[in-house]
């Protein structure tokens, strides 16, 4: 009988949603993610599978778990995992297979519309300034007819593209790995270079993992290429963007505005100058987290664990 340990900081209710699809005969333990390392190492020493949320784990725990068949993440991001150590120990790692892609795609649209319609300012004005509509629409915009550039056409990028079809926007994408022709046709997207995407787009939305090749993918040179009216949306990882360069671009008018779910440091320093910019809408790294997401994640996780237990390769494998 497989032994599964779920190290997590989720509430009991949400953790139970994640483990609900587990086969009845499996032994599944839900334990606090912040247990002392020695205790975690002891508990994991005879585990077959580890499930993690958040996506981090200490070296001593991995080295103690000599029988691990898979480390399964509940999240999509894997940038805080010790990939080199996992490869050394020959322990496979899998992320959530895009099961939060719907949630992140919807949040991406929430940020786009919040920036384009200046929703946070409008809300403040109705509450405090007597039904003040700011400027009768001089600085609010529609997505209809705009060009949207999607950087990264993975699970999330594709969900964003699907939702742009009814908005009747033109959609460009940049990805080192081109989508199949039939996928491009169904999503109504055009693959271009990053430089062309930045030059042509009214909205640029980022959906890439944080790896060496994507760290500071967006820097001063990239912002200089963008339209002065363009907006940047980031729901992937903060360090994909050079934060100082973004602050300079927003202050200097190189780009118009931004919608940010992620920052370089989280939580960020209260004195971070980006927090004082009025042309930014922030959310606290919450794009992929909704009440509805946990069941989808749990179904994928336990399907994946059962694949591995049956001797098959895991889906959504990272590295190795």
Image (cartoon, rainbow, N blue to C red):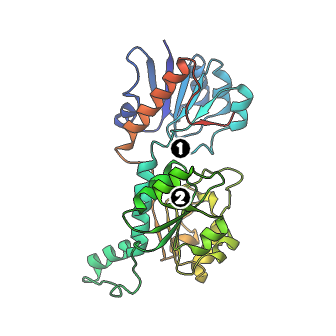
Q: Position of residue 230 (x, y in %)?
A: 53, 76
Indicate which disc residue 262 carries.
2
Quadrant the C terminus occupies:
top right
Quadrant in the rendering for residue 311: top right
Indicate which disc residue 76 carries.
1
Task: State whether residue 94 appears in this view.
Answer: yes
Give the alpha-carbon distance from disc 2 to disc 1, as whole Å: 14 Å
**Above or below: residue 153 compared with residue 281:** above
In-front residue for pair 257/159: 159
Q: Earlier in the sequence, mark 2 or mark 1?
A: 1
Task: State whether residue 285 appears in this view.
Answer: no
In-front residue for pair 186/125: 186
Residue drawn 36% across the image and 28% down it:
20
Q: Position of residue 18 (x, y in %)?
A: 40, 33
In-front residue for pair 312/11: 312
In-front residue for pair 14/146: 146
Dot 2 falls on a residue whose secondary structure is loop
């Amino acid at each position: 009988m497989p032994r599964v340990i779920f190290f997590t900081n989720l509430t009991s209710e949400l953790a139970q949603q994640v483990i609900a699809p587990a086969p009845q005969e499996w032994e599944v333990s839900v334990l606090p993610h912040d247990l002392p390392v020695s205790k975690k190492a002891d508990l994991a020493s005879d585990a077959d599978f580890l499930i993690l949320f958040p996506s981090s784990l200490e070296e001593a725990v991995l080295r103690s778990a000599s029988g691990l068949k898979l480390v399964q993440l509940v999240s999509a991001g894997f940038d805080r995992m010790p990939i080199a150590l996992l490869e050394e120990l020959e322990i496979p790692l899998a992320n959530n297979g895009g099961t939060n892609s719907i949630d992140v795609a919807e949040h991406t649209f929430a940020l786009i519309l919040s920036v384009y319609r200046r929703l946070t300012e409008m809300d403040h004005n109705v509450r405090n300034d007597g039904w003040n509509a700011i400027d009768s629409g001089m600085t609010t915009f529609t997505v209809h007819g705009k060009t949207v550039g999607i950087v990264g056409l993975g699970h999330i990028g594709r969900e964003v593209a699907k939702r742009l079809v009814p908005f009747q926007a033109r959609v460009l994408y940049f990805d080192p790995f081109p989508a199949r022709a039939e996928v491009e046709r169904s999503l109504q997207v055009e693959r271009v270079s990053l430089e062309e995407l930045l030059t042509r787009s009214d909205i640029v939305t980022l959906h890439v993992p944080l790896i060496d090749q994507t760290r500071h993918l967006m820097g001063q040179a990239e912002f200089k290429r963008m339209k002065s009216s363009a907006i940047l949306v980031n729901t992937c990882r903060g360090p994909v963007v050079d934060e100082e360069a973004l602050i300079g671009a927003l202050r200097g008018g190189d780009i118009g505005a931004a919608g940010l779910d992620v920052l370089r440091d989280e939580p960020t320093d209260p004195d971070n100058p980006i927090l004082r910019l009025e042309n930014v809408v922030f959310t606290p790294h919450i794009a992929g987290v909704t009440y509805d997401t946990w069941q989808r994640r749990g179904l994928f996780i336990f399907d994946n664990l059962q694949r591995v237990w049956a001797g098959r390769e895991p889906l959504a494998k990272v590295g190795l």
